[in-house]
Image (spheres, rainbow, N blue to C red):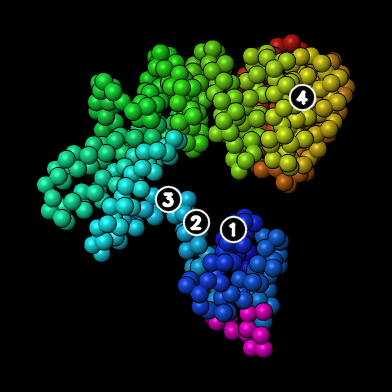
């Protein structure tokens, strides 16, 4: 039952969506089948435990068809009817969030029926809504193009001569729509190539880039993506990157949340590439971009700060040795994390901060408050515990904790195999260092170098150098 497409879809609904869907299913305009309403009522009553509930098809059938013998095929029909209704409901919700889709359909219908006054009134309203929106959505250029297309169709149907000028608007808006989307997707494709994806053939992008570069005036939306693409593809682009940073800061209030998030993520990835090239000045740029995304909430998901973003800010601040600033950041911003990881993230981050400052007592105090509620933080805290024992020269405690941790990893079946192997490799290398003689130093260093799947590689090399 859990694999049923209907159950999977219903399990993904939010509380507010359940109530709206109930109105949708009970509306006679969309559904006149009473048995489908009863089927929905059954799932509605189970909605809070639906993902874990053990649902019996015979029980569901008795609820939908009281005093009727079980008929698998008949029940399957009701499942299909309700599934189709649910999918239509989700589509309707999406259309309502993109108001211009409704405007476009309405304008096409009014034009087809020859309702000229209605059409002109709605056309003016749509044009005003597009141009007066302070934060352009990513569909701005699409909407302008579609509106120009509808306007040309209207003028041509009336055989009016002014359609000649409208054709120019249509062509210009089509160009802008194409340039904007082409640059966005080109940035995404180049970004994916950098993290191991296959090489993409991005046709015409150089011609487009050169053409836009030569224009005396360029809309800032298009210009931001043009500079982003140039930074992602050109090695020596410090000047372009700083211009991009300035544009992001200048126009942040005029960008939609989705657009700002996309540009910030691209820019952070540009910084990451520069850092890998040894240009450490980009640590500060990356941190500033993360903080812009947090202050504007562009990097929030479902009104929460992701723990990935939180952790990356912590690591950047540690790298820059911004200890006082980081402590304030952790205490002020951990409340924006999802409830289930909030305390773990705070204690783990404060432990990292204390470790970096050499305050190992405080580090151990925070580590002891990290539980297995979130495996990532718990396992990371065990690594930090081992490092703290080494830093305080508690080698007996280090050996004991190391053996205990390796046993825990081997027995635990909830940790993914890849992550488990990565941690076991770290433990094995540390164990190798602790039991090796000085004359084995080069072999140990080679072993560390050759082991690709590991964490804390630089720290292990430092320990090997110190001990051996």
Would residue 439 appear left or right of 136 to someone viewing this image? right
Q: Does residue 4 appear in the picture of this structure?
A: no
Q: Which mark is residue 99?
A: 3
Which element carries disc 4, helix, strand or loop? helix
**N-term mark: 4 or 3:** 3
Q: Which residue is painted at 35% across and 33% down in the image?
A: 183
Q: Which residue is mark 1?
A: 17
* First-in-chain label (2 vs 3): 2
Q: Are marks 1 and 2 in contact (CB under 8 Å)?
A: yes
Label 3 vs 1, first from the N-terminus? 1
C-alpha gap between disc 1 and disc 2: 9 Å
Q: Mark 4 or mark 2, which is nearer to you?
A: 2
- Where's the C terminus, which quadrant? top right
How far apart are the two marked residues, 4 and 2, measured between alpha carbons? 42 Å
Mark 2 → mark 3, Cα distance in angstroms: 11 Å
Stretch in magenta: 63-74
Q: Residue at x 26, y 20 (%)?
A: 216
């Amino acid at each position: 039952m859990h694999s049923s497409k209907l159950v999977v879809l219903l399990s993904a609904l939010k509380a507010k969506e359940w109530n709206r869907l109930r109105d949708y299913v009970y509306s006679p305009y969309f559904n006149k089948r009473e048995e489908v309403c009863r089927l929905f009522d059954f799932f509605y009553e189970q909605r809070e435990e639906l993902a874990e509930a053990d649902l019996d098809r015979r029980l569901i059938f008795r609820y939908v068809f009281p005093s009727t013998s079980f008929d698998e095929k008949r029940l399957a029909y009701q499942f299909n009817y309700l599934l189709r209704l649910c999918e239509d409901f989700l589509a309707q919700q999406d259309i309502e969030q993109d108001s211009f889709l409704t405007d476009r359909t309405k304008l096409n219908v009014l034009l087809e029926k020859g309702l000229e006054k209605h059409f002109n009134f709605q056309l003016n309203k749509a044009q005003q809504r597009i141009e007066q929106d302070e934060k352009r959505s990513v569909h701005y250029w699409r909407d302008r193009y579609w509106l120009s297309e509808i306007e040309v169709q209207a003028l041509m149907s009336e055989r009016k001569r002014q359609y000649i000028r409208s054709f120019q608007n249509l062509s210009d808006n089509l160009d802008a729509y194409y340039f904007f989307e082409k640059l966005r997707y080109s940035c995404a494709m180049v970004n994916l190539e950098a993290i191991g994806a296959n090489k993409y053939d991005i046709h015409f992008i150089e011609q487009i880039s050169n053409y836009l570069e030569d224009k005396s005036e360029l809309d800032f939306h298009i210009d931001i993506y043009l500079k982003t693409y140039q930074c992602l593809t050109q090695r020596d682009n410090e000047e372009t990157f700083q211009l991009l940073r300035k544009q992001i800061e200048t126009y942040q209030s005029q960008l939609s949340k989705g657009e700002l998030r996309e540009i910030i993520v691209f820019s952070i990835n540009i910084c990451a590439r520069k850092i890998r090239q040894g240009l450490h000045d980009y640590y500060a740029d990356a941190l500033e971009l993360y903080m812009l995304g947090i202050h504007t909430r562009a990097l929030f998901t479902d009104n929460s700060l992701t723990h990935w973003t939180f952790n990356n800010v912590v690591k950047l601040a540690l790298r820059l040795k911004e200890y006082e600033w980081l402590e304030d950041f952790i205490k002020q911003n951990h409340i924006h994390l999802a409830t289930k990881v909030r305390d773990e993230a705070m204690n783990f981050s404060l432990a990292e901060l204390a470790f970096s400052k050499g305050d190992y007592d405080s580090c151990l105090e925070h580590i002891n408050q990290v539980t297995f509620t979130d495996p990532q933080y718990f396992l990371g805290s065990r690594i930090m515990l081992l490092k703290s024992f080494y830093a305080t020269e508690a080698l007996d405690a280090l050996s004991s904790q190391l053996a205990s941790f390796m046993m825990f990893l081997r027995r635990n079946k909830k940790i993914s195999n890849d992550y488990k192997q990565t941690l076991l490799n770290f433990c094995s290398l540390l164990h190798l260092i602790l039991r090796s003689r000085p004359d084995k130093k080069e072999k140990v260093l080679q072993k560390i170098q050759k082991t690709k799947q590991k964490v804390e590689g630089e720290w292990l090399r430092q320990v090997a150098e110190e001990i051996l």
